Image (cartoon, grey):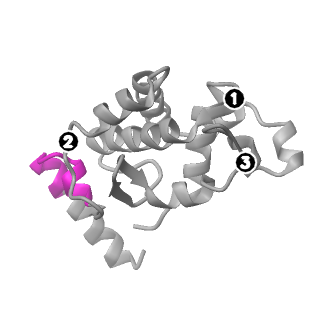
């Protein structure tokens, strides 16, 4: 599996557009995690194809975090439009972002956003840490599938198919 940087950026921009482009970094990372987990459990694949690692404060999408962690901050809030060129920033709308996302991805992002919108750090941490993941380790897709044997079997067959195609 290789990280889909464009899809991760679109997902993060979509979430932040719901809050006038400014969003708390922690809330953003947990919303992306939750949306990926929901999408995986329903459709058998992640939205972003990111790698998740368990940190002290819950699961983190490793590559997405690296992409945004150094953006300028106002307290803990970041403006995701800083990922886009000045020209692109001026024309960026939620409709343009939605155009490039599948409806299933939008649905998962919306559901995750509703869970974390307006929540403080402690509530978000409590929600994402209800499931214990191995500390400081990569969280496998099988673990994110939460024991769903049919989903795990499907994911394995998809991996075998991709390997056979050389992807």
Q: Which of 108 and 61 lies nearest the eye of the viewer?
A: 61
Percent x, y for residue 115? 39, 24
| Residue 119 visible in the picture | yes
Q: Residue at x 45, y 60 (%)?
A: 62
Q: Residue at x 41, y 52 (%)?
A: 60
- What SS does tag 3 mark? loop
Q: Which residue is mark 2?
A: 131
**Is the residue under label 3 in contact with that under label 2 (CB below 8 Å)?**
no
Circle 3 crowding by C-alpha within 10 Å: few under 14, some 14–19, many from 20: few
Label whose residue precedes the other's in the sequence (1 or 3): 3
Residue range corresponding to the magenta coloring: 140-153
The numbered mark, 2 or 1, whose residue comes first in the sequence reads 1
Q: Residue at x 41, y 30 (%)?
A: 112
Query: Is 133 on the left or on the right of 60, as rendered?
Result: left
Residue designated by label 3: 72
Q: Is residue 4 visible?
A: no
Instruction: Please name whichever residue, 102 or 14, is drawn nearer the observer in this view of the structure.
Output: 14
Q: What residue sits right under mark 1 in the picture? A: 95
Crowd class of label 2 (few under 14; some 14 to 19; many from 20; radius 10 Å) = few
Specify the quadrant that holds the C terminus: bottom left
In the rendered structure, does residue 145 fall within the stretch colored magenta? Answer: yes
What quarter of the picture does the N terminus occupy? bottom left
Give the quarter of the image for residue 101. Answer: top right
């Amino acid at each position: 599996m290789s990280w889909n940087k464009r899809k991760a950026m679109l997902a993060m921009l979509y979430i932040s557009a719901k809050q006038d482009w400014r969003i708390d970094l922690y809330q953003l990372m947990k919303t992306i995690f939750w949306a990926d987990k929901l999408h995986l459990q329903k459709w058998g694949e992640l939205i972003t194809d990111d790698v998740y690692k368990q940190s002290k404060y819950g699961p983190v999408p490793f590559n997405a975090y690296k992409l945004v962690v150094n953006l300028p901050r106002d307290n803990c809030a970041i403006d995701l439009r800083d990922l886009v060129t000045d020209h692109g920033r001026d024309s960026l709308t939620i409709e343009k972002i939605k155009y490039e996302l599948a409806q299933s991805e939008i649905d998962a992002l919306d559901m995750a956003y509703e869970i974390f919108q307006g929540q403080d750090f402690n509530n978000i941490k409590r929600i994402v840490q209800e499931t214990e993941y191995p500390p400081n380790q990569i969280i496998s897709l099988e673990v994110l599938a939460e024991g769903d044997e049919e989903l795990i079997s499907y994911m394995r067959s998809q991996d075998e198919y991709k390997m056979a195609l050389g992807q």
